Every structure is written in structure tokens, then in C-alpha cells.
Image (tube, grey):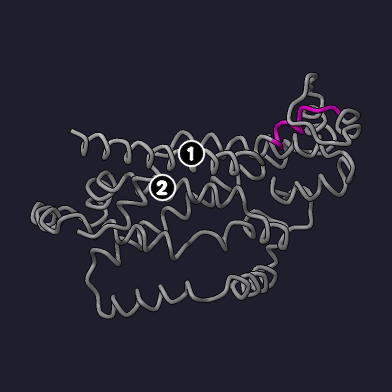
């Protein structure tokens, strides 16, 4: 009994240590978000009068959120980002699903060599890809257009690899049975593969949405017309020409508004994201 009690005490102490470390880490990670929201509800005068930053406010205000939509065309940035995100994600899903299925299920000469060469593209620095894409889009006169924003983002080596590995886990017997019944590859993909691999497809979709929403370098490079600004480079416009460099609370309010959709998406689908990544990286 004494040995059992000692083991329980050690296990309890270990759990306390682990959870204490997790709590500390959670506070470190979440504090910037708390500070962002707190600053966004402080008035301009109260924020500037704080010689020592305060961790709370007794007089919160929503004036900064009103100013975020009136001082700059934030609603237009939202609409542009929504169009860009939905169109890019839809096209990307078609391209990556078909490519992953071809590499996973269709037998053709040089398939493995081609897939290895395709994976090697992940080794190319992103800066080189940006330069090539910029030259191509400029030569086709697609700057300051949604086509110029969307086209370089409609495929992803990583997403194709993730889906390919997940598709390959579906038993071959299902494919052979479907072919015996006269099912085409497209019908097999839509009616068998995609329902079975739905968590991974959802994960890829959500990750692409987040990627598009946070996209900054490419939109900033390819657009100098405010009519095509996304929320990411709209933040820079807000800083330079909207509220000025001094009105930090109004800037934080704009950042909060821009961040809310992604936070909600992640909170709603977090289990699907974890499940899809785990299934995509597991063989067997």
C-alpha cells in the first residue's frame, strides 16, 4: 500500500507540473491577443495617458471599431478578401484533388518519378517563385486584378502530397470492385474516395482559407490599386493613410475585426484539422 501511495503521489506531482507548464504556456500565447482586444476598447485619450500600461480598463468603448470602418474602406477589403479566398480555395481543391487522385490511384509510366520531381519543388525558395510569378503575371497584364491575385495560389505541393497519402490508404479492393461494376474513375473519386477522406479534405480547405486570408507579400506586390487591396495589405494602408501612426487603439480594432473570422473557423473546425492532419500523415 505504501508503494502504491508513493506512485500515486509521484503521478499527481507530475500531472501538476505538466498542467502548470501548460497554463504558463497558454498565458504566454494568449496574452498578445488579450492585449490586442484590450487596446481596441480603450479610448485614444486614455491609451495615450497611460505612462504605465494597464492590464484592464474601467471605461471600454466601441468607438475605435466604428472608426475602423469609416476612416478606411475596411468593408471593401473584407469583400475583396472573401472573393479572393473563396475563388482560390475552390480552384485549388479541384486541382489538388484531381492531382492527388492521379498520383495515388492511376497507373501511368513514370508516375513515381514525376511525383518525386514534383515533391522536389518544395525545396525551391519561395522568393524565387514570387519573382517568377510576378514576371509572368506582369507579362500577361494581370496586375491589379483578381486573376493576378488568384492564379499563383491555385496549387500546392504540400496539399497534393497530403491528399495523395490519404487517398492511398483507401483499400485497393474498393477500387477493383468499383471498376468491376463499371464505375468510372471520376465517380469513384466523388462517391468513394472523397467521403472516406472527408476529414483531410476539410483540413486542406481550412488551411487554404487561412493561408489566403493571411496572404500579404503577393497581394502587396501585385496590387497598388486600393480597389483590389485585401485585409492583410489593408492593415498597412490603415497604418499609413488611415488613422496615422499614433492612433494605436483604432488600428488594434481593425486587426481584431480582421482576425475574428479565422479564429472562429479554427475553433469550429479544430477537431477536423487535427484529425485530417493525423490521417494524412499515417500509412497503413
- In this orientation, which residue lies closer to the viewer: 237 or 175? 237
Q: CA distance from mark 1 to mark 2?
A: 31 Å
The residue that mark 2 highlights is: 203
Secondary structure of residue under mark 1: helix
Q: Is residue 141 magenta?
A: no
Which image quarter is the N terminus in?
top left
Instruction: Give the farthest residue toward the front.
Output: 2
- In this orientation, which residue lies closer to the viewer: 63 or 136? 63
Question: Taking 206 as reference, is 4 left or right?
Answer: left
Residue 30 in percent (x, y) is at 60, 39
The span shown in magenta is: 35-43
Secondary structure of residue under mark 2: helix
Residue 226 in percent (x, y) is at 79, 49
The label nearer to you, 1 versus 2, is: 1
Question: Taking 106 as reference, is 222 left or right?
Answer: right
Circles 1 and 2 in contact, beta carbons < 8 Å: no
Q: Is residue 133 above or below residue 192?
A: below
- What residue is drawn where x is 89% and y is 36%? 51
Label 2: how many Cα within 10 Å (few below 14, some 14–19, many 20+): many
The residue that mark 1 highlights is: 20
- In this orientation, which residue lies closer to the viewer: 22 or 221? 22
Amino acid at each position: 500500500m505504501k508503494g502504491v501511495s508513493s506512485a500515486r503521489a509521484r503521478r499527481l506531482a507530475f500531472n501538476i507540473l505538466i498542467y502548470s507548464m501548460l497554463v504558463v504556456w497558454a498565458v504566454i500565447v494568449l496574452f498578445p491577443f488579450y492585449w490586442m482586444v484590450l487596446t481596441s476598447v480603450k479610448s485614444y485619450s486614455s491609451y495615450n495617458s497611460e505612462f504605465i500600461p494597464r492590464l484592464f480598463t474601467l471605461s471600454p468603448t466601441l468607438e475605435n471599431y466604428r472608426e475602423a470602418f469609416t476612416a478606411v474602406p475596411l468593408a471593401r477589403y473584407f469583400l475583396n478578401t472573401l472573393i479572393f479566398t473563396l475563388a482560390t480555395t475552390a480552384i485549388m481543391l479541384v486541382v489538388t484533388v484531381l492531382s492527388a487522385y492521379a498520383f495515388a490511384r492511376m497507373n501511368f509510366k513514370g508516375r513515381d518519378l514525376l511525383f518525386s520531381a514534383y515533391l522536389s519543388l518544395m525545396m525551391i525558395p519561395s522568393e524565387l517563385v514570387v519573382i517568377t510569378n510576378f514576371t509572368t503575371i506582369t507579362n500577361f497584364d494581370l496586375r491589379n486584378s483578381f486573376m493576378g491575385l488568384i492564379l499563383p495560389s491555385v496549387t500546392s505541393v504540400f496539399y497534393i502530397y497530403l491528399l495523395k497519402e490519404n487517398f492511398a490508404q483507401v483499400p485497393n479492393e474498393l477500387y477493383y470492385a468499383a471498376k468491376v461494376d463499371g464505375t468510372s474513375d471520376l465517380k469513384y473519386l466523388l462517391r468513394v474516395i472523397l467521403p472516406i477522406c472527408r476529414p483531410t479534405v476539410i483540413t486542406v480547405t481550412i488551411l487554404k482559407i487561412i493561408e489566403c486570408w493571411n496572404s500579404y507579400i503577393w497581394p502587396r506586390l501585385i496590387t497598388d490599386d486600393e480597389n483590389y487591396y485585401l485585409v492583410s495589405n489593408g492593415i498597412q494602408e490603415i497604418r499609413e493613410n488611415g488613422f496615422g501612426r499614433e492612433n494605436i487603439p483604432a488600428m488594434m480594432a481593425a486587426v481584431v475585426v480582421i482576425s475574428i473570422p479565422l479564429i472562429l473557423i479554427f475553433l469550429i473546425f479544430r477537431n477536423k484539422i487535427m484529425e485530417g492532419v493525423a490521417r494524412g500523415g499515417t500509412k497503413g
